[in-house]
Amino acid sequence: MSEHDHHHDHDHDHPRLTDAELRVRALESLLVEKGLVDRPALDALIDLYETKVGPRNGAQVVARAWIDPAYKAWLLRDATAAIAEMGFRGRQGEDMVALENTPGVHNMVVCTLCSCYPWTVLGLPPVWYKSAPYRSRAVIEPRAVLAEFGVVLPEETEVRVWDSTAELRYLVLPMRPEGTAGMDVEQLAELVTRDSMIGTGVARRPGDAS
């Protein structure tokens, strides 16, 4: 596990595709052209795992931690067991650590070697997470990266960057938004974004949730 307090800057809107990604896209195009794969069905399947199934699992974990102090303490002490207790277990989630964001500390996650990512709670990794610019610059100048994602932190807030590995993966516990008193787990889960659980975003405020 490595931790850095440096700055970053990163182009997540137009990442350069790797050779492997280019080959995958070429293969997809060939399969679609030959009628072996239905493009809308493929896109829907990818969207399901990128934005719905996985992140919704993580959002349930975060929302429960916000509302249940005992569960939050367990999550921070033994994230693997606490997450598994909710039924979220499997490959890419065997060994988990939860990182709590506070007014004084902001955590963000990167995988500098490849794209290790907790599929069980976040689904498939977004393209920008796997891109070389994010993987390198997140370590060097994280504040600049966060600013590009719309997260501007006070100078006194410490930024900690955690390097995910094949043996250990992280889930960021974002700060609970103001104005959420009295909301239940399901309502709170709607405020939790995928990026807030990576540390490149924050939870939505109630008025911002769709």
Image (cartoon, rainbow, N blue to C red):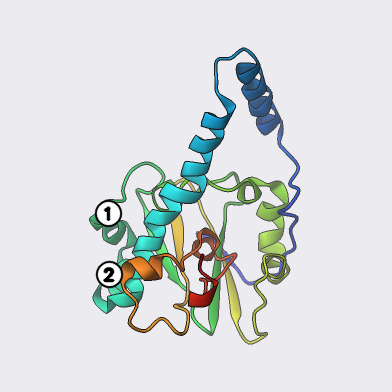
In the figure, is residue 140 to the left or right of 102? right
In the figure, is residue 179 to the left or right of 25? left
Tag of residue 151: none
In the figure, is residue 111 to the left or right of 57? right
Closer to the camera, 86 or 96?
86
In the figure, is residue 204 to the left or right of 24? left
Q: Residues within 10 Å of mark 1 (few under 14, many from 20)?
A: some
Residue sitting at x 53%, y 61%? 198
Q: Position of residue 75 (x, y in %)?
A: 32, 67
Q: Position of residue 191 (x, y in %)?
A: 46, 68
Where is 66 relative to 62, above or below?
A: below
Q: Position of residue 202 (x, y in %)?
A: 55, 71
Name the residue tied to disc 2: 74
Residue 168 makes an appearance in the image? no
- Mark 2 element type: helix
- Mark 1 element type: helix
Residue sitting at x 47%, y 84%? 178
Where is 19 relative to 83, above or below?
A: above
Q: Amino acid at mark 1?
A: Ala
Q: Amino acid at mark 2?
A: Trp
CA gap between label 2 and label 1 equals 12 Å
Quarter occupied by residue 199: bottom right
Name the residue tied to disc 1: 84
Q: Earlier in the sequence, mark 2 or mark 1?
A: 2
